[in-house]
Amino acid sequence: MPIYAPTLPPAPDLHQGHPPALVLMRFDLARLWRQKIGRFFGFAFLMILLWKVARIYVDHLLQTNPAFKPMQDFAKTILTQGAAFQADLLNPASYLLWFLVALVGGGLVARDTLYRVRPLMYAHPVAPKDYLLAKLGFASLLPFAILLPFALLPWLMSLVLAGLHGPVWVTAPLRLLPAMAISSVLMGSLAVGASSMASTPRAGIGWVLGLVLGTGALSAMLRGLTGIQAFDALNPVELAEAWPQLFVGVDRPLVAWLPAILGTAFHTGLWTFVAARRTRPSEAVI
Amino acid sequence: MIAFENLEVRYASAREPALKGLTLSLEPGIVGLLGPNGAGKSTLLKALLGLLTPSRGSGTVLGVALGAPEAAKLRARIGYMPEYDALIEDASAYEQVAFWGELSGLAPESARDRAHEVLYFVGLDEARYRPVSGYSTGMRQRVKLAQALVHSPELIFLDEPTNGLDPDGRRRMLDLVLRVHAELGTGVILASHLLGDVERVADQLVILDLGQIKAAGSMAGLRKILARRVELRFLDPLDAAQEAALTELGVVLEARNGLYDLELKEADPAGAFRWAEGRGATLVQVTPRHDRLDEVLLRALHPVVQGS
């Protein structure tokens, strides 16, 4: 037998809270926390980060310790310290990052569809653009947050150990951070668009992986048939890897500037449009 | 509380409008919204929540015009309890009620405090910390009611609040609805197909079918009409002339095997005996039919031909 309160006191003042998009993002973060997938991915990304930082330290030892002088020529072949080395800092096992984005982003909209809570959200002071902004923001901030230590820690260590002449350029973060932002928005929009087409989180994961691998296969086919390298820009995995290369000025990037801009605009625009269409209030059955 | 005039709502893909020129004014109180599936109840609620823009007509909810730019802010003054399970299964009742409170504009600390208060109000005590996936149907309905009340709305829409509840659970839920109105002063629109529920709590009634209002009015007025509903039994079957003359007494709702259901023009059934005497018929029994609210609904939805 339930025990009921004698009465309900008046509610505190409204309009004191955070913007709806921020509330939605915090709730998604709490959901992610409950999923307990951080242990595996945290360990995997930490190992990759340690490897990248270790390379900086090894380079420092080779430059400063006379005992390693005979190995310097060999080290130069593996530690080029050029543009490719800078771009490679943001390549923390690209497929692992995409898999994480699929695992988390695939359920972002689909879970709301499964539990049918989106109509209820729109019955609150939440506009469709708030909802879309929250989902895109969360799906984009996640890869950005994971990539951030990969851009900053090696740079910081290089700066501390070797000053201005370390293996990581002093200006590297200025080039890597915009590249990270673009790649993260690309990943986020694709994940949210794919998730909006699914009715369960598992189906959402399948949609994300299917779109990533499917567009990759399509770009490979088109390139094979026509011999035009620009079709690589249809492949979101290559696009995400190409942006750091373009910003640091690698000689032969995976995708050139113009195809990269067009490809990113195509994917981001298309999947954001799909997500916006699929999360309209009129799609919400109440 | 709510008023609309010639309100028409049309879905882009549909030929016919879902709501066809509704005109109605509802006073503060508990309004029962009745109608079969596809009647337009949900569409009406969507339009009142500002989720659908009317293709024609106008209306106001709590003084705010439908389709106005401030309609989004209006939703902070409305609570909505959907018919289906709109619960986040992997979250506890406390977490999600606080979440809905924050979405309505409460500060995070206030939303957490408020979630405790409102869950206690609806009768969920220690269970509030458990994930809702393990809740019974009655508990789930109470969580849905709690999320609709968390921000102290001026008006709540309850869509089939007693769905799936046993008689005791139904009674408790309806008691809560009455308390919400009596103690908090919240206006209630209750959509239900269970006439007993509506009859128990509502003070106004709207019957909707095929996007049109079939009947609307106060329950007190409806009860007055119901008090004039009688079943007449005659000793011998009436002839055609006598049957035709029955309209002098009132509206003939149904005729079967010498029994006639009528809505009398006057509340006094003695007039029926006088009419029978004057027409040479022997009236042997007059039975009041004021407990048949379901017939009012059926009559509104499927009007009978007089004298049939």
Image: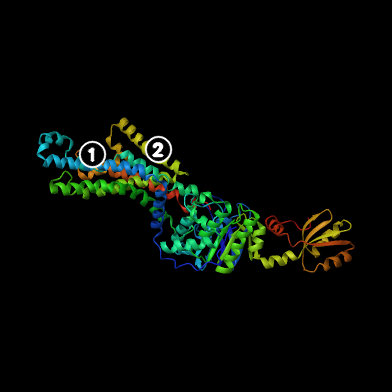
Image depth: mark 2 or mark 1 in front: 2
Q: Quadrant of the C terminus of chain B?
A: bottom right
Task: Give the residue type that dot 1 points to.
Answer: Pro
Is residue A235 visible in the rendered structure shown here?
no
Tell me the chain of label 2. A
User: Within 10 Å of the Cα at label 1, are there few (<14), some (14-19), or many (20+) other Cα atoms?
Assistant: some
Q: Position of residue B104 (x, y in %)?
A: 45, 61
**Residue in view at x 26 percent, y 45 percent:** A150
Foreground residue among B203 and B276: B203
What residue did someone put label 1 on? Answer: A253
Q: Label for residue A210?
A: 2
Label 2 and label 1: CA atoms lie apart by 25 Å
Taking B216 as reference, is B133 left or right? left
Q: Is residue A127 above or below residue A235?
A: below
Secondary element under disc 1, as helix, strand or loop, is loop
Image quadrant where residue B19 sits: bottom right
Foreground residue among B70 and A205: A205
Along the polypeptide, which appears first: circle 2 or circle 1? 2
Q: Label for residue A87?
A: none
Image quadrant where residue A216 sits: top left
